[in-house]
Image (cartoon, rainbow, N blue to C red):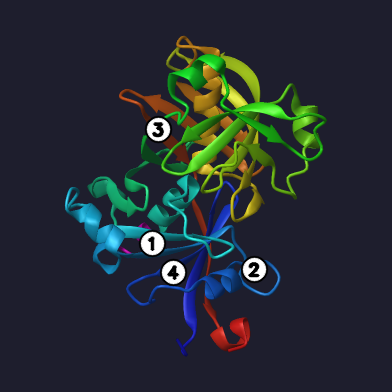
Amino acid sequence: MTAPLHVTKGHGTQNDFVLLDGRHTPPLDADLVRALADRRAGIGGDGVIRLTAATDLPEGTALLATEPAAQWFMDYRNADGSIAEMCGNGVRVVADYARSLGLWDPAAGDLVLGTRAGVRRVRRVDGPEPGTDWYAVDMGQWHLPGGEPAATAGADAEVTVPGLAVPRPALSVDLGNPHTVLALADEAELAAADLTRAPQVQPVPPHGTNVELVVPLGETVGADGAPVGRLRMRVHERGVGETRSCGTGACAAALAVRTWAGPQSPAVWLVDVPGGTVRVTALPGGRVELAGPAVLVADLDVDLAALTGR
């Protein structure tokens, strides 16, 4: 590519991404992804998302066989250039990007989006503040890799976090990408954790894992009279480091706390992350929904020669 590369910058609760229109941009190599995501010499982001036709990639073509409506595909890479299955905050941001490009009209129905973790359906919903829009994503099926024994024990892994005195038991949660969730005693411990270095997880996950540190904050009663749980979270994302938010991580954290609390715990959880708040809802049939804001902040042209030195 010799012409300037047009990109958009967006974020979901400050989990930020460089967005590209795949109709005009070929697949990106890892070096270019790292250059775009670089926060000092590039645009900066926790990842790079290329929104492209499903038929542009083998993974998207395969999804069309069972979900013909999934015409658009989220081609996502972490900031280090590695390919990732998907990203919950990224799904919301790329949905707003599709809307801005005229590829999706929220008033006409759900956006059916292909990802490497399967199809994700997105709808626009009212935000908590009057006049604000959020996006809600059906994140699909989730499960505990350790099964019922892990649920009963409350843990199937042990995590050593720099800044915390001793290793902690943790629970593995799969949302199409891997997560390991550990509970801390209070917000002082949460603040003391050093996530500039990757936590050490045992047994070592074969494909790496995102690590969520959570502090449950109790329950309140929602406007409909149903209980609503709340928790605070920090996250270390594989291939990225600590991020201001992680959508699948928020789901994993809420589902882990709900597993620990038992069957009478709330179905709806507000998850406070450094970048804001998202809402996680446990759905019937072992599915989960993530809702939160998405913001597009800039459109710009990138001088590829200056960016890469090529």
For the residue labelled by badge 4, is the local secondary structure a helix, a strand or a loop? strand
Circle nearer the N terminus (1, 4)? 4
For the residue labelled by badge 2, is the local secondary structure a helix, a strand or a loop? loop
The kind of residue tagged 4 is: Leu
User: Is residue 261 found inside the magenta-colored segment of the image?
Assistant: no
Cα distance between the residues tagged 3 and 1: 30 Å
How far from the left and from the top, in percent, is residue 11? 54, 54
Circle nearer the N terminus (2, 4)? 4
How far from the left and from the top, in percent, is residue 37? 59, 66
Instruction: Please indicate, yes or no, whether residue 35 appears anywhere in the rendered image.
Output: yes
Circle nearer the N terminus (3, 2)? 2
Is mark 3 in CB contact (under 8 Å) with mark 1? Answer: no
Residue behind mark 1: 100
Residue behind mark 4: 20
The kind of residue tagged 3 is: Trp
Cα distance between the residues tagged 2 and 1: 25 Å
Q: Which mark is residue 38?
A: 2
Cα distance between the residues tagged 3 and 2: 32 Å
Q: Which of 186 and 274 is in front in this view?
A: 186
Position of the C terminus, as image quadrant, is bottom right
Position of the N terminus, as image quadrant, is bottom left
Q: Which of 94 and 213 is in front in this view?
A: 213
Q: Which of 283 and 128 is in front in this view?
A: 283
Q: Residues within 10 Å of mark 4 (few under 14, many from 20)?
A: many
Q: Nearer the viewer, mark 3 or mark 1?
A: 3
Q: Residues within 10 Å of mark 3 (few under 14, many from 20)?
A: some
Is mark 1 in CB contact (under 8 Å) with mark 4? Answer: no
Residue behind mark 3: 142
Q: Nearer the viewer, residue 51 or 81?
A: 81
Give the extent of the magenta segment.
98-102
The kind of residue tagged 1 is: Ser
